[in-house]
Amino acid sequence: MSTPDIKSFEDFWPYYVRAHKNPVTRTVHAIGTSVGAAVAITGLLLGKKSLVPVGAAIGYGCAWYSHFFIEGNKPATFGHPLYSFAADWVMISKMVRGTMDAEVERVTAQAVPVSAAQPVPVSGDGVLH
């Protein structure tokens, strides 16, 4: 999947969704991000700052594993770390509300295949052939 020209989160979101089509990838992301955030926040609250990178490693480790071995693509984090972090939480929110599968379908349906983007041949008489 090629990286589109991304200038905003709105540009990034469809790219992110298409990179997370597999529900197993999304589940591994949600678990890793949630556990990683909990570990990092716990470390901050308890004054154990060494837990913050452990939390990050858990979150990123789960996400990267799911991309390389489940989804079979490159993590969006590599090119857009801040948008990717925000999108993880949007995705988790949609998963909790039960709307993420529909979002994947919506975004996937909007993707126009190259063949569909080709002009329809029209003869000189104006009739489609």
Image: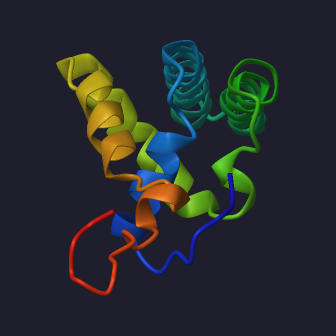
Q: Tell me: residue 59, above or below residue 18.
A: above
Quarter location, residue 11: bottom left
| Closer to the camera in the image, 93 or 26 | 26
Q: Tell me: residue 123, above or below residue 53.
A: below
Q: Is residue 106 left or right of residue 89?
A: left
Q: Write the residue at 21% across / 17% down.
A: 98
| Closer to the camera in the image, 19 or 118 | 118
Check the picture and name the quadrant holding the C terminus. Answer: bottom left
The spot of residue 39 in percent (x, y) is: 60, 23
Q: Write the residue at 28% across / 31% down.
A: 93
Q: Write the residue at 54% across / 15% down.
A: 31
The spot of residue 23 in percent (x, y) is: 48, 16
Q: Is residue 22 left or right of residue 94?
A: right
Q: Is residue 21 left or right of residue 120?
A: right
Q: Is residue 10 left or right of residue 98?
A: right
The type of colouring in the image is rainbow
Q: Tell me: residue 15, above or below residue 4.
A: above
The spot of residue 74 in percent (x, y) is: 76, 44
The spot of residue 42 in percent (x, y) is: 54, 25
| Closer to the camera in the image, 79 or 115 | 115
Quarter location, residue 66: top right
Q: Tell me: residue 49, above or below residue 78.
A: above
The mark total stands at 0
Q: Residue furthest bottom?
A: 124
Q: Residue furthest front?
A: 125
Q: Write the residue at 40% across / 73% down.
A: 119
